[in-house]
Amino acid sequence: MARDIEDIQRELDRTRRQFASTLDQLAERSRPENIVDDAKRSATDKLNDPKVQKILAGVAGAVVLAVAFGVYRSRKKSNDLKELQRMLSERLS
């Protein structure tokens, strides 16, 4: 059964409105402020996740240990060098 012109026109109008609405939504989503806000919200949500907090705490602990170990080794080398210098100065004296 053939559709009449009015049905086709109504369908075209409805499709046009839906398309315009979709374009408006895409334009709104693609605004830089909205993209930044979405990224902030996503990052905040992830940081509030207990699993992520545990992982970050573990990484922070590992970094602290690595820095402490580096400081310890640096001081030990410095002390060892001072001891060698002292021993050499005693030997040469």
Image (spheres, rainbow, N blue to C red):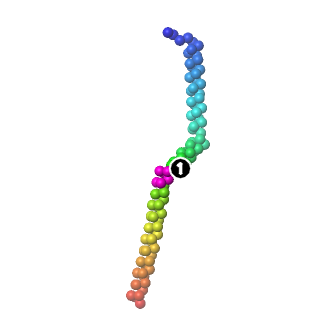
Residue type of the residue flagged with mark 1: Asn
* Residue 26: % across, % down: 56, 34
Q: Is residue 51 magenta?
A: yes
Residue pictured at 49% horizontal, 51% vertical: 50
* Residue 45: % across, % down: 53, 46
- The residue most toward the front is 50
- The residue most toward the top is 1
Residue pictured at 46% horizontal, 54% vertical: 55
The residue singled out by tag 1 in the image is 48
- Residue 38 placement: quadrant: top right
> Which of these two is toward me, 41 or 74?
41
Q: Main secondary structure of the magenta part?
A: helix
> Which of these two is toward me, 70 or 81?
70
* Residue 42: % across, % down: 54, 45
Q: Which residues are magenta?
A: 50-55
Q: Is residue 2 above or below residue 45?
A: above
> Does residue 43 appear to the left or right of 66 in the view shown?
right
* Residue 62: % across, % down: 45, 61
- Residue 86 placement: quadrant: bottom left
Q: Is residue 91 above or below residue 61?
A: below
Badge 1 crowding class, 10 Å Cα cut-off, few under 14, some 14 to 19, many 20 or more, is few
Residue pictured at 59% horizontal, 25% vertical: 17
Residue 32 showing in the rendered view: no
